[in-house]
């Protein structure tokens, strides 16, 4: 869809579509009807000018992999927490300042990658991600890590979940 400014709504007729990569050009937005693509398992949203992700993203109940990137991304809806089958989530956007509390509802999430954002903190609900095995938080503006992820005692981090990989660099982390 390189030259197309608007994604054709006729995509919802592709009832067996499991993998969709939308790389929107300048001036394009993510369609609200994206949540009607019920069979999607993998979704890659790379938009140059989109600033919001539609609430309907939370209706993609079969989604297992989600990548969201946009240099002007300002908001991710709380409805993202409805994606109960999501295993891998990538979020990147230089202007993004908040991760919604709803992220704690991603009960199947195994990998969370948040990078190149302007977030300064993570929601406490991130500690609810009991299946999380990989957490990558590089190139953000983090100033602290919630105690729900790890508890710091005598300069040692003690994990309270099953994290086997924790990557955090190029942040303002002071924890």
Image (cartoon, rainbow, N blue to C red):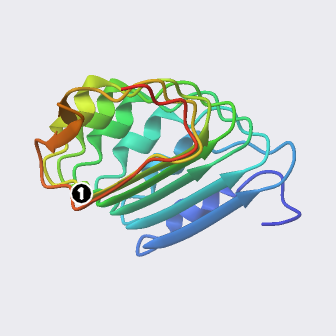
Q: Is residue 54 left or right of residue 30?
A: left
Q: Check the image and report above or below for 150 versus 7.
A: above
Helix, strand or loop for disc 1: loop
Q: Is residue 13 left or right of residue 94?
A: left
The structure residue drawn at horizontal position 84% and vertical position 60%, both measured from the top left corner, is 4
Q: Position of residue 64 (x, y in %)?
A: 33, 63
Of residue 129 and residue 54, the one placed in the foreground of this image is: 129
Q: Check the image and report above or below for 116 versus 54.
A: below
Is residue 147 at least partly visible in the picture?
Answer: yes
Q: Position of residue 71 (x, y in %)?
A: 73, 42
Residue linked to disc 1: 85
Which image quarter is the C terminus in? top left
Which image quarter is the N terminus in? bottom right
Of residue 103 and residue 57, the one placed in the foreground of this image is: 103
Q: Residues within 10 Å of mark 1 (few under 14, many from 20)?
A: some
Q: Residue furthest front?
A: 154
Q: Position of residue 24 (x, y in %)?
A: 76, 55
Is residue 149 at least partly visible in the picture?
Answer: no
């Amino acid at each position: 869809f390189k030259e197309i400014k608007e994604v054709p709504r006729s995509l919802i007729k592709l009832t067996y579509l499991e993998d969709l990569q939308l790389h929107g050009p300048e001036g394009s937005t993510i369609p609200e009807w994206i949540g009607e693509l019920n069979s999607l398992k993998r979704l890659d949203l790379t938009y140059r000018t989109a600033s919001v992700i539609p609430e309907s993203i939370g209706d993609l109940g079969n989604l297992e992999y989600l990548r969201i990137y946009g240099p002007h991304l300002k908001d991710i809806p709380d409805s993202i927490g409805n994606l109960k089958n999501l295993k891998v989530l990538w979020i990147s956007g230089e202007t993004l300042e908040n991760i919604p509390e709803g992220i704690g509802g991603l009960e199947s999430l195994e990998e969370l990658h948040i990078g190149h954002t302007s977030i300064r903190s993570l929601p406490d609900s991130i500690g609810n991600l009991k299946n999380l095995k990989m957490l990558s938080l590089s190139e953000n503006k983090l100033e602290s890590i919630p105690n729900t992820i790890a508890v710091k005692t005598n300069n040692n981090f003690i994990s309270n979940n099953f994290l086997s990989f924790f990557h955090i660099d190029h942040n303002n982390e002071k924890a």
